[in-house]
Image (cartoon, grey):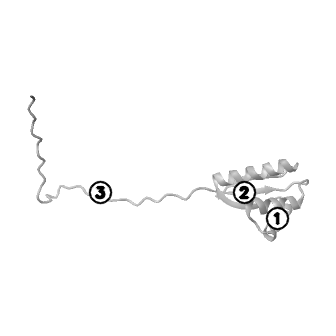
Amino acid sequence: MPTKKPTPKVQLPDRDDGGSVVLERLTQRTKPPQMFQVLMLNDDFTPMEFVVVVLQEFFSKDREQATQIMLQIHLDGKGVCGVYSKDIAATKVDQVLDAARKAGHPLQCVAEPIE
């Protein structure tokens, strides 16, 4: 039968001899995620009413807000529909483009990062 060796005991010092190392916790701040604005672009073929409906359905705008954004798109060539994280903005763009294609409209929608 093999003999079991005794495990050595570690001697801990009773007092601090000044040679201890103290680690300081540095507070790390994470940057907020990059935000993207979803823009609709003006064209001469998509009906204004369709744009209003899309703004209400996909961007949760009430009728008045949707109409104001639609007019901005019409007058300025583009309008901000909302500001979202990258993935949500991409999903919103896809939803708008899909709805426009199904309705037979050439409406364009893009997401661009906010500086």
Quadrant location, the N terminus: top left
| Residue 76 in view (yes/no) | no
Determine which of the numbered discs, if any, sits on residue 32 in the image. Answer: none
Residue 72 tag number: 1
Q: Nearer the viewer, residue 88 or 4?
A: 4
Mark 1 residue element: helix
Asked whether the viewer can see residue 14, the reply is yes
**The quarter of the displayed image where residue 3 is located:** top left
Circle 3: residue type: Leu
SS category of the residue bearing label 2:
strand
Amino acid type, callout 1: Gln
The residue pinned by badge 2 equals: 38
Residue at image location 77% in from the left, 53% down from the top: 96
* Left or right: 105 as drawn, with respect to 80: right
Q: x and y percent of residue 50 in the render? A: 86, 58
Name the residue furthest bottom: 64
Mark 2 belongs to which amino acid? Val
Mark positioned earlier in the residue sequence (3 or 2):
3
Label 3 or label 2, whichever lies nearer to me, is: 2
Q: In the image, residue 79 lies at what x, y percent?
A: 78, 61
Q: Which residue is mark 3?
A: 23
